[in-house]
Image (cartoon, helix red, strand yellow):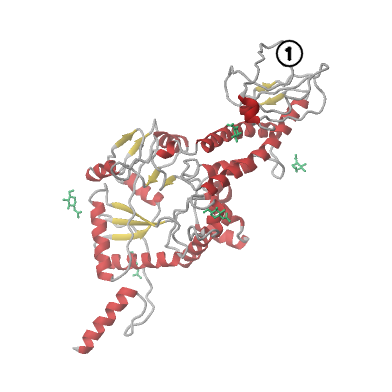
Amino acid sequence: MAVVGMLLWCLTIYLQGGLWLPVESKYIAYNTTGRIVPGKINVHLVPHSHDDVGWLKTVDQYYFGGNNSIRGACVQNVIDSVMSSLFEDKNRKFIYVEMAFFQRWWRQQSEAMKIKVKDLTTLGHKYIKDEFGQIPRVGWQIDPFGHSAVQAYLLGAELGFDSLFFARIDYQDRAKRLKEKNLEVVWQGSKSLGSTSQDDVLLFDYNVQERVNAFVAAALAQANVTRTNHIMWLMGTDFRYQYANSWFRQMDKFIHYVNQDGRVNALYSTPSIYTDLKHAADEEWPLKTEDFFPYADHPNAYWTGYFTSRPAFKGYVRLMSGYYLAARQLEFFKGRNTSGPNTDALADALAIAQHHDAVSGTERQHVAADYALRLSIGYKEAEKLVASSLASLAESTSNIRQGNTVINFQQNLLMRVWFYRCPLLNISYCPSSEADLSDGKSLLVVVYNPLGWKREEVIRIPVSTEKVVVRDSSGGEIESQLLPISNATPHIRRNM
Ligand SMILES: *[C@@H]1O[C@H](CO)[C@@H](O)[C@H](O)[C@H]1NC(C)=O
Ligand SMILES: *[C@@H]1O[C@H](CO)[C@@H](O)[C@H](O)[C@H]1NC(C)=O
Ligand SMILES: *[C@@H]1O[C@H](CO)[C@@H](O)[C@H](O)[C@H]1NC(C)=O
Ligand SMILES: *[C@@H]1O[C@H](CO)[C@@H](O)[C@H](O)[C@H]1NC(C)=O
Ligand SMILES: *[C@@H]1O[C@H](CO)[C@@H](O)[C@H](O)[C@H]1NC(C)=O
């Protein structure tokens, strides 16, 4: 009896730690083969990490693992270790959404590594289309603090995504949807399609039978509030998978033992596989219209402060977004220069600023400063492109033909021109327009309308003389007024 007791005890240790088994200490090949079993509850395990593109640390600090006293997070390790775990077992899957980090990682990989990874992954967006020739079909917005119906329209009707997954939804809405099996819906933002899912179940391996029972119970509970026999578990959270193998090893065991048990079926999966099965199921989905706003995670905890926090930064992002679109048009007129000044840095900075801890204002101060710095660097570069593009348009004597549209830059100057933008018109500051305009000198002002329709706007330009006449490009006089600057203005301008 003692021996049996001993064996049981040893066995328990093995099951708990999964490390050693004195009696049968041998290699176990976990069967991670994924397949769908019709009629059974299929648990889709979706490994992922949620890596904020700047929050408590800047985007680069998160990537390299800098400033680790604030938060021990190094995204480089996440991607490195996930890749080696994926190479180990072709059944494993992983989804990665933060392209800002992935780009940083990708740039540093050898050609050999790039080839291996291209064989392996199908990750998202234009960068991925360029590098991998893949068009993403699934939106993954785990962390944003609410979702506007415009998202459904943009991602569905405009981008053609099959589905959108997100985690944060008002707690009362969630409770009601659970009861009515309405967590997955067809979301009609305006005329689009999209479905949602959520829930994050993390299980750790203490004892096989106990763990398998817990797994099965969790699967049954979720199946109970989900339509069809497919349920999805998000296996990951903020900055996880820095030691990816520890996650994958646990999931390997689950898939192995749960499928041996046979009450439910578990497999490595992705949102696309899951979505396809939801589409294939002959199921009527409830319709959702309007926003998932405002977001509250418990009573009296509405996440609405961020709508207005860091207004200066929000304004800056918006201003730069408009400038970026105008600059892109001018870049197109001139012809894009991959090495020279172009709009890439501004595009990058703006993309990073769309992160849900960036433009929302929920980041730390030094991170906010880092976002603003990136925008300003991008803007400086785009400004050079805009100036040279406008100059070459002004210098060209002929009309520019683009398709059926003739753009007539009629002007009578044949000299070299260089344009300066006046970003500080908000404090009536523009050195170029304030230059000495006496003795019949003239100042060429180009006002560029990047919108596709005619606009009538009042334009204000600081000048240093009253003797000015404003004319249009054919010499006709344009109505203008001279206004004295307010007493406060010199104070705001300080020494400028
Ligand atoms: C592994 O699991 C799959 C699906 O669960 C099954 O079809 C296959 O026979 C298993 N392979 C082995 C070697 O047990
Ligand atoms: C680390 O974070 C702090 C904010 O807590 C910031 O002031 C500091 O500049 C950061 N360090 C670096 C190297 O950026
Ligand atoms: C399934 O849902 C019903 C009704 O909400 C509940 O009574 C039951 O306990 C649930 N079963 C499981 C396994 O969660
Ligand atoms: C692109 O920019 C570089 C550096 O500014 C310049 O040397 C080069 O002539 C430009 N190429 C074209 C095609 O304009
Ligand atoms: C004017 O706009 C710039 C950004 O272009 C901003 O940095 C500055 O704070 C603004 N000045 C005032 C007084 O609002």
Q: Position of residue 70 (x, y in %)?
A: 49, 57
Residue placed most toward the observer, 327 or 73: 73
Q: Position of residue 63 (x, y in %)?
A: 54, 56
Residue at the location (25% across, 70% down)? 209
Label 1, secondary structure: give it. loop
Residue placed most toward the observer, 217 or 485: 485
Left/right of residue 38 with respect to residue 144 in the rendered view:
left
Q: Quadrant of the N terminus?
A: bottom left
Hey, what amino acid is under mark 1?
A: Val
Q: Quadrant of residue 45?
A: bottom left
Residue at the location (33% across, 84% down)? 22
**Which residue ends up furthest to the bottom in the rendered image?**
2
Q: Position of residue 169 (x, y in %)?
A: 34, 43
Graded by Cα atoms within 10 Å as few (under 14), some (14 to 19) or many (20 or more), the crowding at tag 1 reads few
Left/right of residue 229 with respect to residue 117 in the rendered view:
left
Q: Quadrant of the C terminus?
A: top right
Left/right of residue 309 with respect to residue 205 in the rendered view:
right
Residue at the location (39% across, 31% down)? 191
Q: Is residue 181 above or below residue 120?
A: above
Left/right of residue 328 with respect to residue 41 in the rendered view:
right
Q: Quadrant of residue 377?
A: top right
| Quadrant of the rendered image holding ligand 5 | top right
Q: How many marks?
A: 1
The residue wearing badge 1 is 469
Q: Is residue 225 above or below residue 421?
A: below
Whether residue 344 is visible, yes or no, is no
Whether residue 324 is visible, yes or no, is yes
Q: Position of residue 65 (x, y in %)?
A: 54, 60
Residue at the location (54% across, 51% down)? 58
Mark 1, ligand 5, within 8 Å: the answer is: no
Residue placed most toward the observer, 335 or 81: 81
